[in-house]
Amino acid sequence: MTDITTKSDGYAVETLPGQERYVAPIEETPLQSVDSVDENAPATSMWADAWRTLRRNPLFIISGLLILFIIVVAIAPGLFTKQDPNACDLANSLSPASDGHPFGYDLQGCDVYTRVVYGTRTSLSVGILSTLLVVILGTLIGSVAGFFGGWLDAVLSRITDIFFALPMLLGAIVVLQMFKTSKSIWKIVLVLALFGWVGVARIARSAVMESKNLEFNTASTALGSTPARNLFRHILPNSLAPIIVIGTTSLASYIVAEATLSFLGVGLPTTTVSWGGDISSAQTNLQTDPLVLFYPAAALAITVLAFIMMGDAVKDALDPKSRTA
Amino acid sequence: MKKKALAFAAMACSMAMLLSACGGSSADNAADGTTAGSNVITAYASEPQNPLIPGNTNETGGGKPGDLLFSRLVSFDKDGNASNEVAESITPNDDATQYAIKIKDGWKFTDGTPVTAESFTKAWSYVANAKNAQKCSSFFSTIKGYEDLQKDGLKGDEQLSGLTVVDDHTFTVDMNQSDSVFPIKVGYLAFAPLPEAFYKDTKAFGEKPVSNGPYKLEKWDHNKELVLVKNPDYKGNEEVKNDGVTFKIYTDDTAAYRDIQAGNLDVMESVPASFTKTYKTDKKIQYYSEAGSVIQTFTIPSNLEHFQNNTEEGNLRREAISMAIDRQQIIDKVLNGEATAPTDFTSPKTPGYSKNLKGSEYLKYNPDEAKKLWEQADAISKFDGELTFAYNADGGAKPIYDAVVNQLKNNLGINASTNPIPTFQEFRDAITNRQMTGAFRTGWQPDYPSAENYLWQLYSTAAADGKGSNDGDYKNPEFDNLCLQAAAAKSTDEANKLYQQAEEILLKDLPAFPLYYSNANGVASLNVKDGFEMNWQNLPTYESMTKK
Amino acid sequence: MGKYLLRRILQMIPVVLGTTFLVYALVFFLPGDPVKAMFGDKPINEAVAAQIRAEYHLDQPFIIQYFIYLKNALTLDFGNTFAGQPVIDEITRAFPVTIKLGLMAFVFEAIFGVVFGIISGLKKGKWYDTVILIVSLLLISVPTFVTGFVLQYLLGIKWSILPVTAGSDPTFLDLLMPAMVLGSVSMAYIIRLTRAEISSNIAEDYVRTARAKGMGNGQVMLRHVLRNSLIPVVTYLGQDIGALMGGAMITEQIFNIHGIGFLTYQSILKGEANLVVSIVTLLMLVFVVCNLIVDMLYAALDPRIRYA
């Protein structure tokens, strides 16, 4: 008395009398896709997951295109202007915009547009490299301190305290003095990283301390995972959100800090064009000629905006819980 | 850390010495009819870098109050003309190697003790004596016995052998060499008389000096203010028209300017770079701007390869560089007109200043000639290096040197760049150690109004090799000779003629390149009624100011 | 807990030694000669310079100088500045105003930062989230001196709402504008940080659970979301209060505040080792204490974090 229904995929399902009244045929159930496990599919990592999400996020696409554009400007400024950023004639000092000079001239009679274009490379590389170095260094030190605790935490945290108290100006003058003849941006990156990592380290430490006690860590340990594997596979990725936020937000401050250092005479050679340097120079005439300051500042703000948007998108992708539907 | 802030740092660091404005006739200086406090001038200042001891004060923070507190043998009027103040007479012998000085009767310190000949001789010996570590000691180097006071093992109370007290009101000064400028030099703050109380407790004195000038110190609230009140016993050349001057310590000149706009501060002796374009039309303030006594230059070391002073190639290059710079354009565009194009090596406020010296055409913009001279020099020996221009980055000089470098690149087609050095300290160290490998910023704020101060101190052989302020080690016997003749001259006019001849040599050799004379400019709040002017040291005439 | 505290206090000893040594070395290796600089561009009298060097032990090798400083510091004598003022007086004069300014900036950035951060985080993607993003972005990209200059002109000169500069013995009102300028950049960071944390926590299971159990929206926010979101924010605030105590070189200058930041800046420029080392050591102690408080707060905010 049993009727056998043969399913399209060939499996036979036996339906007992009366049962059909209570359970919908499985092909009509939306839960099917949830419950079905594709056992043949390759295991997807958290990163691959994140990438899948990112590809569909308009925030990511817009910021990605913007960053791509900024990178192109940084690599090939010659594509965007035919002028030399260091060719300046005092006779043009603070002249308004004219044909071929859409942003006008600065105090020294340099073309502001050309300088904004050429400043991209320095500012972007200082910003990105410093941020990367700071995030890597800070995350590493902070997470190790927060995860292992004990004397390691004590030592690392106290080193952090010392670095926090050090005035950057003092360290910068002394450190940069050692590389006085070098014209590379690495010396600036080094100084900014040397004084920047502490902030990220404290944040990373607290985030790791928070995640360390979450259930997935206990679960993973129960499954026989080593502490180091736990830290890098599970805890760190779960603690990245605040680090990414601080990282992308500080990008701007590193670009501005480069200017301050150059201004103090401890930075890059004065022939190097950078947004920060031009912002500093323009501040004297802020009241009468605010536009000279506006353009490099706007370039800086747009770049930072792109990176903050990118950071938000990446953060959301890594943290499935905060995904907006 | 930013430019405005740096401009301030520059002021604090510019260790130029300043004198007081002492002008007008001695008249009844009783200022009555106003309630206490209402006629007190508040003035912009920075914290003194040393205790308030005249011989140890060599920067503006201490110099401004110091000048108002202490009266010297002579005083200077607004334009820098000297007249006797505490001195009755200063009489030189024939070759200006000895002076007989008579002082006036009746001068008193604020503790009631009289100002005597010994008040001067003991004070001068104290400053000259190396044991006492007074920063102005080298001002006494022309007085006999100075060398003896620079040795090891001194106690500190040894006296200059060249000073002899004749009686309470007379003393004589024996010099090492002719020094016709001495009667002007003694108007410098380091030559102030000191009371006996000073030697009893120098530390307490440095905090609250006992003085003899137009004002006395009421209190010094560190990093906050110095309160000076009118000295009722003062009987000098100055007519004090207010009840006191309160120096307010500022971190930044822009903040001070804002306070003047808001009426919280009465007067300041500079215009921050951010306001040079607008201050003359600013309805919230009153201003003063005239050619001043500070000369800004840059120096190329005399022995710098391709630029040596005694070679034809070097001379051609120096002339070319000087003529490739459009000074007026820099003044107009970068300084917003707050300076005057130079024509000599002194300043428009210096006695003997001239616009028509032979060779002053080298200070005029002439790019074609410059290019030609540079090519001639290249024909002798090709220069393919980079000419760098060093300046201290904490002094706000960046836009000036950016402009100079751009003009040289455009007009001579050479490779030039700026070389900012973080601190004034490091900058001076590199200069005094002779480590500069290119041009560097120099400038001069006079100690006393005399061409000698601008020339002998900066370009004489005696001041080279680290023994003075001849930072480029320029040496020219012909120049030395003319200066020595001037020092022994009978009259100021004769001396100034000789100094002008000496300057013509400088214009030919260009050991340093005059860029501009900084304007004496300043602003005052609308509360100031009258008397707001600037003197020969680019400082306000504090004594003559009154309030509404 | 008591044992933990004691251990943290004992840890300060090597940290103080390390800091003083490091900073003394840095000042020592600052290029330039502070004594020569005292003479400006005037001739240097070598005999006088030697006297001054001897007075400040600058003629001694580095390690001796350091030990002299350390030895005197043990008796609470931190030496004199080149102007002849006791270092301790300079610091006690400058510190109160910096503390006042720092606390005001701290309260400003903490309150506005967290509030705007919450609004932004709860309503992600709404128009006011975008406005808050753009404003905080502006604050980050525009250097402090520009913010200060513009505010000074608008609020101080043009509309005369607030005092232009603070000056000596500043009142609450005098410090209001500098505190806003000083706190503005950190406020932007806190907004971003709070927003990120809130938006991540609001989707957590426990929130759903709490809601399912019938808890009110406000209750959920207060009792669960906020408490869980604040750990990184508290960390940031904790390190920021330390940084604020270090004074702000630029803000203090713009507003004529004679605080620790300006003092540090000046003493670095002049190569005043005694002053720089004393200030930095003091600040370091402030950081250690702040961090200690923050670590205690972690335990309070998150019961799972425990200190043995």
Image: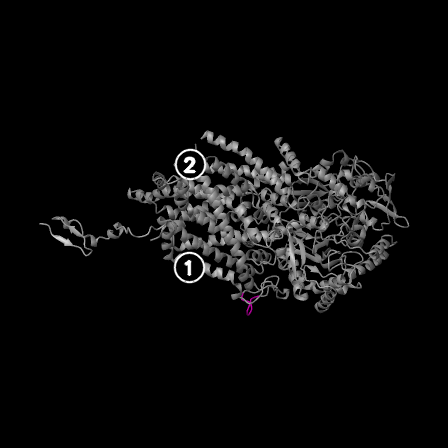
Q: Nearer the viewer, residue C171 or A40?
A: A40
Residue A98 belongs to the span the image colors magenta: yes
Residue C158 point in image, percent of width and height = 55, 55
Mark 2, Cα crowd under 10 Å, few <14 / some 14-19 / many 20+, is some
Q: Nearer the viewer, residue B36 or C228?
A: C228
The chief SS type of the magenta part is loop
Mark 1, Cα crowd under 10 Å, few <14 / some 14-19 / many 20+, is some
Q: Regarding mark 2 in the picture, which secondary structure is present there?
A: helix
Residue B526 point in image, percent of width and height = 64, 53
Residue A92 point in image, percent of width and height = 61, 66
What amino acid is found at the position of numbered circle 2 in the picture?
A: Ala
> In the picture provided, is A51 more to the left or to the right than B510?
left
Q: CA distance from mark 1 to mark 2?
A: 41 Å
Q: Nearer the viewer, residue C116 or A20?
A: A20
Query: Which residue, given by chain and number where applicable, does mark 1 sit on?
Result: A62
Q: Is residue B424 visible?
A: yes
Start and end of the magenta stretch? A96-102
Residue C90 belongs to the span the image colors magenta: no
Q: Is residue B232 visible?
A: no
Going 22% across and 52% down the picture, which residue do you hit?
A29
> In the picture provided, is C199 more to the left or to the right than B489?
left
Mark 1 and mark 2 on one chain: no
Q: Regarding mark 1 in the picture, which secondary structure is present there?
A: helix
Above/below status of B206 relative to B405: above
Q: Disc 2 sits on a residue from what chain?
A: C
Q: Disc 1 sits on a residue from what chain?
A: A
What amino acid is found at the position of numbered circle 1 in the picture?
A: Ile
Query: Which residue, given by chain and number where applicable, does mark 2 sit on?
Result: C299
